[in-house]
Image (spheres, rainbow, N blue to C red):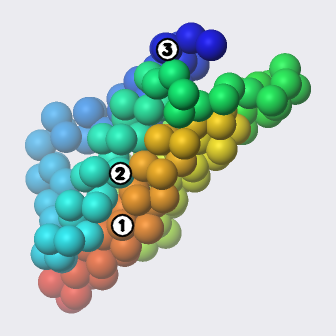
Amino acid sequence: MEWINIFGLIFMAVIMIPNIIFAASGRGGFENLWKNRRVEILEQIGRYGCFIFMIVNIPGTWSGWRSDEWFAVYLLTDSALILIYLVIWVTAFRKESLFTALSLSAIPSFIFLFSGIASGSVLLTVSALLFAPSHILLSYMNQKAKEKSNG
């Protein structure tokens, strides 16, 4: 078992590219209109846990892939989901919607959760279970607040 998951590193880098481009575009960044400190804290703990444990395998906290076939399913599933994520990002750059907000929060949440389960990583799975519901809820509530303030 290796400490570094190079595929997880590549997946994280690809997921972050549109986020960095969006943040640098000057379109107002990621404004949090729905203020819920507890949910925000859970999301951040889960987010950074997912970022770290997608890449770093702590010995004793992950078991690795059950088989070569399971590893192939991991690679194909994450690759397909990331491709869908990127396509939605391209459309989101032009126009925001509830579908877009939920998609761009649910897809990485599923990637992290699936990756944790597929690789047998307890820490990634727990991080994803913290991140997913809080991230999706924040995305939903922020989009609703944007729609309400716009009209």
Residue positioned 65% across, 44% down in the render: 117
Q: Which residue is mark 1?
A: 134
Mark 1 → mark 3, Cα distance in angstroms? 28 Å
Q: Mark 3 or mark 1, which is nearer the start of the sequence?
A: 3
Which percent across, then down, holds residue 142? 26, 73
Residue positioned 59% across, 31% down in the render: 62
Would residue 44 be seen by someone viewing this image from the given angle? yes
Residue positioned 68% across, 26% down in the render: 64
Which percent across, then down, holds residue 115? 61, 39
Badge 3: how crowded within 10 Å, few (<14), some, or many (20+)? few
Which of the image's four quarters has the C terminus?
A: bottom left
37 versus 23 height, above or below: below
Number of numbered discs overlaid on the protein picture: 3
Nearest-to-viewer mark from 1 and 2: 2
Residue positioned 53% across, 33% down in the render: 61
Nearest-to-viewer mark from 1 and 3: 3
Report helix, strand or loop for mark 3: loop
Q: Mark 2 or mark 1, which is nearer the start of the sequence?
A: 2
Instruction: Identify the disc placed on residue 3.
Output: 3
